[in-house]
Amino acid sequence: MAGAGLRAAARRWLLCGGHGGPRAASSSPSCPGCGPPGPGAHCPGVPRSAPAQAPTSGADLSAHLWARYQDMRRLVHDLLPPEVCSLLNPAAIYANNEISLRDVEVYGFDYDYTLAQYADALHPEIFSTARDILIEHYKYPEGIRKYDYNPSFAIRGLHYDIQKLGTAYRGLQPVPDEEVIELYGGTQHIPLYQMSGFYGKGPSIKQFMDIFSLPEMALLSCVVDYFLGHSLEFDQAHLYKDVTDAIRDVHVKGLMYQWIEQDMEKYILRGDETFAVLSRLVAHGKQLFLITNSPFSFVDKGMRHMVGPDWRQLFDVVIVQADKPSFFTDRRKPFRKLDEKGSLQWDRITRLEKGKIYRQGNLFDFLRLTEWRGPRVLYFGDHLYSDLADLMLRHGWRTGAIIPELEREIRIINTEQYMHSLTWQQALTGLLERMQTYQDAESRQVLAAWMKERQELRCITKALFNAQFGSIFRTFHNPTYFSRRLVRFSDLYMASLSCLLNYRVDFTFYPRRTPLQHEAPLWMDQLCTGCMKTPFLGDMAHIR
């Protein structure tokens, strides 16, 4: 239904020159978005017999611009019938590279946020406990205890400047653009040597890439906000290290593991779906392995909860406390076997046995002992650096990224508010670009009004995802740094492992061809401004 509506609207535009009806030869010589025609130029929306006359006075030009604006509004409304929304499926798998599951013989998995999906209720616990550690063990001011976790403040993939207290936000307050530019030497450019390195850690800028980092970002912002609000002097690097250490203590001391183990029904999500995915793969003759940084006792209790007491029989190899990402690059650490009670054994490992548990080790010994190499291995994880980057770039495995935020973002994209806001923003951008040839005083006022409206639309669209930072995948028209890493380090990405249940085990995923800037004959702003100059456009009108 939505496709039919779009096709009909597109054909109306192609036949009628964008005005919703036949256009007489005496109409304006320029199409709604082309501006004054240049020598020899011809827009397909205008009859060649049209006289080359354009408004000349300021008032006439202003009226001409607003007429084009209204034409555009009507066209965008026709292009987006109500049923055009909800086109994206939150449970779908999206491909960055072509990959056929028929060729995949071995499936590997991380544990946290891959096999085990955790509820957001875990984040306030991490935040509050780390906050109290700062106060009680690091002797931070008692007043910090007034801050509670705000789940809507930060998003994954943000960079934190350790030396300059952040860029867009300092604590909980936004930093004006002028001050940001001044902080970075009068430019918006951040030198490459300052940026985060291969694993998201640079000399002065840290990128927060995993889901566990959300409470850390929130706590950093709250502590900075308190110090600034009370005019307390502090060293930015010391504050960053203390907060990071406090968050680390929550994990190292096993506090987070205790909370999850005490109430698995509350904290672990989609356990039955994880069981269904693993059972289905084994039933089709696939080999499975698990490589996680979590300890065996924690993984064992979680897997028993999701899968049952015989969960180890589903996996050909299980490795715990692997110390990723160094597991993928450091050849020095040998595998150690654990007994049934989780105690380390001292015998040399010459083979990896099904049903046994191994600790640490390295990928090079893993490859030698299993002979699982190259594109017949598909590994799933939630951390683009620690889980996926080395496997794809250094070892040629296929990789799948688990991005829980994807489900919510797709639901927002499917809303009528988002669809109409984005489409009108694109159309208005194209109109601005082509009408900027009018530079008289009245026309400049019109263009300024359009610029203001465009900026308001950009802010509205951004705030639909997150009021402070927007979408984790896009910053206005550009992909975010997180999104670029996602494309580079993963063949597939999805909201949860359960998305695999929607596809056959021999399904082939094909990435969609995304137009580059010079390859976009059917982008909305060009379609809406009538500047289509492709001779085969009529045959392409069915494309959304």
Image (cartoon, helix red, strand yellow):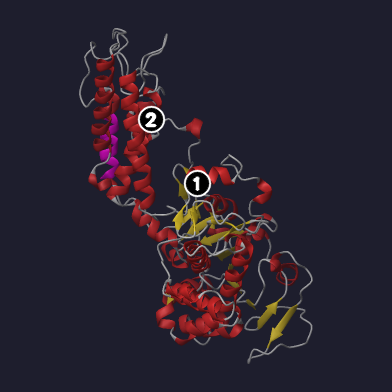
- The residue sitting at 32% across, 8% down in the picture is 52
Q: Residues under labels 1 and 2: Cα distance?
A: 20 Å
The quadrant in which residue 542 appears is top left
| Up/down of 438 relative to 241, above or below | above
Q: Amino acid at mark 2?
A: Gly
- The verdict on residue 10 being magenta is yes
Q: Amino acid at mark 1?
A: Pro
Q: Position of residue 476 (x, y in %)?
A: 44, 44
- The residue sitting at 50% across, 48% down in the picture is 511
Q: Is residue 171 visible?
A: yes
- The residue sitting at 25% across, 16% down in the picture is 60
Q: Position of residue 268 (x, y in %)?
A: 44, 77
Left/right placement of residue 528 relative to residue 264 reads left
Q: Position of residue 391 (x, y in %)?
A: 65, 60
Q: From the image, tell me which residue sits under label 1.
A: 479
| Up/down of 469 relative to 455, above or below | below
Which span of residues is magenta-colored? Answer: 1-11
Q: Quadrant of the C terminus?
A: top left
Q: From the image, tell me which residue sits under label 2.
A: 430
**Nearest to N terminus: mark 1 or mark 2:** 2
- The verdict on residue 342 being magenta is no
